[in-house]
Amino acid sequence: MSEILKVEGLKKYFVKKSLFSSKSSIVKAVDDVSFSLKQGEVFVIAGESGSGKSTIARLILKSIEPNSGKVIFNGEEIKNDSKSLEKIRMQCQMIHQDPYDSINPRMKIADIILEPLDIHKVGTKEERKMRVIEAMREVRLEPAEEIAKKYPHMLSGGQRQRVVLARAFVLKPKVIIADEPVSMLDVSIRAEILELMHEMQQKHDISFIYITHDLATARHFGQRIAILYLGKIMEMGPIGEVLLHPKHPYTQALIDALSEPDPENLHREKKIRINEPLNIDVYEGCRFRARCPYAIEKCKEEPPLEGIENKRDVACFVKLEKNNSVN
């Protein structure tokens, strides 16, 4: 598979001001992150809240500027000029977490889905209308002609997320960034939406960056995964290998934190008991050092993201030998 998107050394730092004093601190939201996305691939970025997942998405789409680093799309670096921005924003679409906030409540469904086609001046007026109905049918918003006349508040949460999907797919992009696309939905329809996204990805050979904290859904939807913690990639590789045989203590900690639907697993041994964080600079050395039960003196240095067996990359001086798995 050819490479459609490449991120090289991406960094984004924010200044955090104290509420009660004049002091400020630097938050390294994304710190030297590099990865590639192949044509037709689903690449998962996973980690807890505040790890920098959504910031990476915003940097790729150039809604915020990085401190340093490159985003290369289809062999060309995306720069802050109108030609580059038009290219990335037409061929790389976003599916947001909250279908309530990501669509205009004052617009009819047809107009919401039509808007990207109007902005990029795709086809004639009649062709645009046809593409809107076609996109609605593809995401199973039926009857399409009737729903097209409605407003967002007249639809269910699942239907609203289908509207968001239709808006993303209507431009027939090469890449879709899905930021926690099912976390706001009822459990009963999450699998349905993920299956729909998988069908569309297969049908149109679309590359996906799937951002999530849910490793269980990630394993069924993704092909490769990067585990992110405090702006750094801790581990990266084929999703089955990473989740079944984790090498980084933080990856294992995420796996151990999964809820257990099987009562017999409630007493399963947790391999990683995360320590309480020490009062140290979290950006000094290994990001996970303050909470890692296996931390050694060398962890005061920053471990490089090194390649190991089976196309795996791990940023850890003490790689795990015994592993757990995601059921």
Image (tube, grey):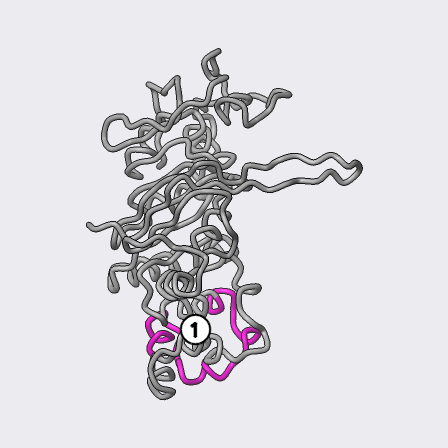
Q: Residue at x 79, y 36 (%)?
A: 21
Total count of labels: 1
Residue occupying the far right of the picture: 20
Look at the image and say whether residue 40 sits in the magenta stretch: no
Quadrant holding the C terminus: top left
**Residue 56 x, y percent position in the rendering:** 46, 47
Which is more toward the observer, 134 or 153?
134
Q: Position of residue 263 (x, y in %)?
A: 45, 34
Dot 1 surroundings within 10 Å: few (below 14), some, or many (20 or more)?
some
Residue 152 is a magenta residue: yes
Secondary element at image label 1: helix
The amino acid type found where label 1 is placed reads Pro
**Which residue shows up at 28% across the image and 55% down it?**
74
The quarter of the picture where residue 311 lies is top left
Q: Quadrant of residue 124?
A: bottom left
On screen, residue 234 above or below 147: above
In the rendered view, tell whether residue 285 sits above or below residue 121.
above
Name the residue beneath numbered marker 1: 116
Task: Look at 49% across and 68% down and name the residue there.
Answer: 160
Locate residue 237, reporting x and y percent.
Answer: 30, 36
Task: Residue at 41%, 84% (x, y): give it.
Answer: 145
Q: Farthest left residue? A: 1
The residue lying toward the viewer, choosing from 80 and 47, is 80
Q: Magenta region: which residues?
A: 134-160
